[in-house]
Image (cartoon, rainbow, N blue to C red):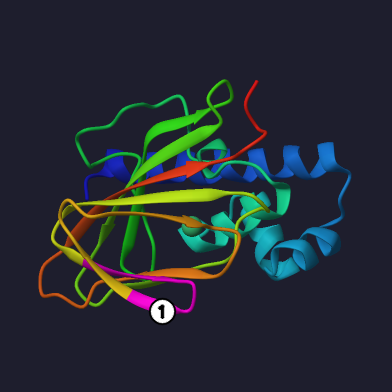
Amino acid sequence: MATSAGGEMQADRVAIGQQLRRLRREQQWSLDRLAMEAGVSKAMLGQIERGESMPTVSTLWKVASAFRTPLSYFLGAATLPAVAPQPGWHQDASGMAVQPLFPFDPALGFEMFVIDLQPGALSESAPHSPGVVEDVVVVDGEMALFVDGEWQVLTAGDGRRFAADQPHAYRNDAERPARFHDLIHYPGAGG
Ligand code: MN
């Protein structure tokens, strides 16, 4: 990674921290309250707010769900649609990278991501806010999706819609990366 990429990560981290603090103040939640609602430690939340720690995608998703706000709210919605997978990608320790394709649009009530799963990747998603629905469409490779208590294998061209206000997970058991589009509907969020 070049220095410029490092600089962008830094900027992202600070922007995410500021956004988090702003949301928390709007909501008038203490760090303790947010820790409880999101299931993320108070220490970690403090580090993220101060820009000292770059949250993983799954941590950020937990926080977004606690606030009932779209994930792309944190991911620099202004930088769109990224075809080149360089800046803006948020790599998770789980082997999952997420990039906004269409940032949240309040008029339409959805956001859409391109998600890459490295071989061996496992990403467990905490339930989103009540009523949230996901459409997963595999673009390349093969992946397994855990929903309604079971794993199902999806290959390129397959799509599944499911209620995302329950635990769900994505896994790549194959030997090459998988890519899918993840469209997240927030019913009632539209204008
Ligand atoms: Mn999800």
Q: Is residue 57 above or below residue 148?
A: above
Q: Residue at x 22, y 50 (%)?
A: 1
Image side of residue 190 versus residue 55, left or right = right
Residue underneath mark 1? 150
- Magenta extent: 143-151
Specify the quadrant of the image occupied by residue 120.
bottom left
Specify the quadrant of the image occupied by residue 101.
top left
Image side of residue 191 versus residue 160, left or right = right
Q: Main secondary structure of the magenta part?
A: strand
Q: Is residue 50 visible from the viewing direction of this image? A: no
Image side of residue 110 versus residue 4, left or right = right
Q: Is residue 97 visible from the viewing direction of this image? A: yes
Q: Residue at x 45, y 45 (%)?
A: 10
Q: Is mark 1 within 8 Å of ligand 1?
A: no
Q: Nearer the viewer, residue 86 or 140?
A: 140
- Name the spot of residue 186 as percent of width and height, x first: 59, 40
Q: Residue at x 39, y 27 (%)?
A: 79
Q: Residue furthest left?
A: 175
- Name the spot of residue 131 as percent of width and height, x first: 64, 49
Mark 1 is surrounded, within 10 Å at the Cα level, by few (under 14), some (14 to 19) or many (20 or more) other residues, namely few
Q: How many marks?
A: 1
- Name the spot of residue 180 as percent of width and height, x first: 26, 52
- Name the spot of residue 139 as percent of width and height, x first: 18, 49
Q: Nearer the viewer, residue 48 or 71?
A: 71
Image side of residue 38 versus residue 104, left or right = right
Q: Residue at x 74, y 40 (%)?
A: 23
Q: Quadrant of the C terminus?
A: top right
